[in-house]
Image (spheres, helix red, strand yellow):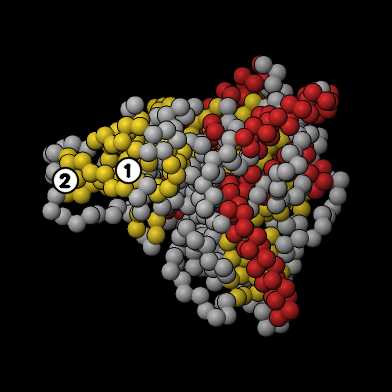
Amino acid sequence: MNTRYIPTVKWFAGYLFLLFFTLYGEKGLCAENRPNVIIILTDDQGYGDVGFHGNPKIKTPHLDRMAKQSTELTRFYCSPVCAPTRASLLTGRNYYRTGVIHTSRGGAKMHGEEITLAELLQQAGYQTGIFGKWHLGDNYPMRPQDQGFMESLIHKSGGIGQSPDQPNSYFDPRLWKNGEAFQSTGYCTDVFFDAALEFIDRQKQAAKPFFVYLPTNAPHTPLEIAESYWKPYRQQGLDETTARVYGMITNLDENIGKLLSHLDRSDLSEKTVVLFLGDNGPQQKRYTGGLRGRKSWIYEGGIRVPCLAQWPGHFREGVKNNQIAAHIDLLPTLLALTNTPRPERLKLDGVDLSPLLTGGKEKLPERSLFFQVHRGLRPQRYQNFAVVTERFKLTGYPGTFGNENLMLQAEPVLELYDLSVDSGERKDVLSKHPETAKTLLKQYEAWFSEMKTTRNFEPGLIVIDREQENPSVLCRYQDGSFQQGVSEGWMVKIVRPGLYRVKINRESEKPGKLTVNWQGKALHEFLKNGESAAEFELAAGTGLLDIWFQVEGEERVYPGDNSPRGDVVISQVK
């Protein structure tokens, strides 16, 4: 089990940049050759959730105008769910390499050793900021500030109002600003965009290039939005759920319009690359532009998303490019566009799309894209996977995302679609093209084996170190290790031996026993009525840390829902 945290990896990457500047100076990375970068990543906004894809109901005038002024990648793919997409986008690597497995229950923790786009750009002189949803680990060394972001305003976990930030709301949300609790005022999407604009203004005044990552949590559930946004859609005859989603997207569209106008007024438009994309398909059933499936499915409706790339004077405007592209391509593309060197040892899975955007090339070499995700911390070969080529798409066990106990058959359940004539995936052509299916299946099997060799599908490790984070909040539902729906504790590394205060969020006020099971030794402390904390001597080491409270005379309870029950705050006393 590879559980060591190796900070020297990132130190070495920084050293390479220093060496580069020492040898070549800043001439090769002069400001005029280094555009600013803004990535807008929305949550659960599918291919059909924009006006420019023919949705007759939704109002997205600013995005529609942006589409006319951008290069649109019409066959752009992401993972079926959000955390895997975010890991691939920020690293340029297939997310299985990064330690991210799915979205919760221990599956959304990216290894701290991963090198992100923010780190590479920061080392090249960019000011970096994130404003919105992170969802790649809430503890050291996985937080935004550990992964290259100099400024951060985020919510924890997978969504506002989810564990561990309960209760919370999209209105006046409680957020985290540069690692500290922050009470904001206003609607969440407005708050994130306003903070990004303020960050941009500061960098312009300082004449520094910037990277702004704007991963909104809208239109993800809960569907909280002012009536003035959703009621007009309801009056059109849409159901309230769809009306609320479209209202959230209309608010988002207004903020994108405000951002683009601000760039124009600040004379930054021609100096700034702006990318807009969704992270996966829609969660609820609604208009999909004719695509089949939605979030969590590996059909087109689950993994194909809107993607616009705008850079006035540099990117082609009003052009639709139908070559396959994906989230893994954004990092190598932006490194090329910003003239940022890549450490030779950094293995990327994506390709540079900049020739498609600038018109340097109409087509890049053909390749296959691979997608897979399902619940559970041990990915199974063939479950809920897809291989996408320019023409064909092979799927395995579609629709099995939530089945952690899927019993695989001797021969995998496969479907094959000819996307060149059937983007809606209505007709399975496996029987007509058996050799194509065989070839793509071999490609998938080789890919899956390679993914396993990188880290053996081990999620990122929480490092408990008072010099980096004290206290550490251990969220059971989001970051605990689950097997078959049962929480087993947390995979952690305790850096320093000593006395630790352990506080647990327990439901019952009755007396009972607080237990800490660490390094093969169970430690117990009796808690009286209403007490929730005790102190324990813990050794340094790496492994599974299990902590629970058990009411006297009752069986142990294993909380497994998306609530703060069983969450732990641990801090080193001495």
Residue type at tag 2: Gly
Q: In the displayed image of the protein, which residue is found farthest to the right?
A: 360
Quarter of image, res 390: bottom right
Q: Are marks 2 and 1 in contact (CB under 8 Å)?
A: no
Up the image or down, 156 lies above or below 376; here it is above
The residue lying at 74 percent from left, 67 percent from top is 391
Residue 21 pos. (x, y %) = 78, 25
Residue that label 2 marks: 512
| Front one among 427 and 558 | 558
| Left or right of 10 on screen, residue 397 | left
Up the image or down, 300 lies above or below 125; here it is below
The residue lying at 67 percent from left, 66 percent from top is 446
- Front disc: 2 or 1: 2
Up the image or down, 408 lies above or below 50; here it is below
Residue type at tag 1: Asp
Q: Which mark is residue 567?
A: 1
Quarter of image, res 431: bottom right
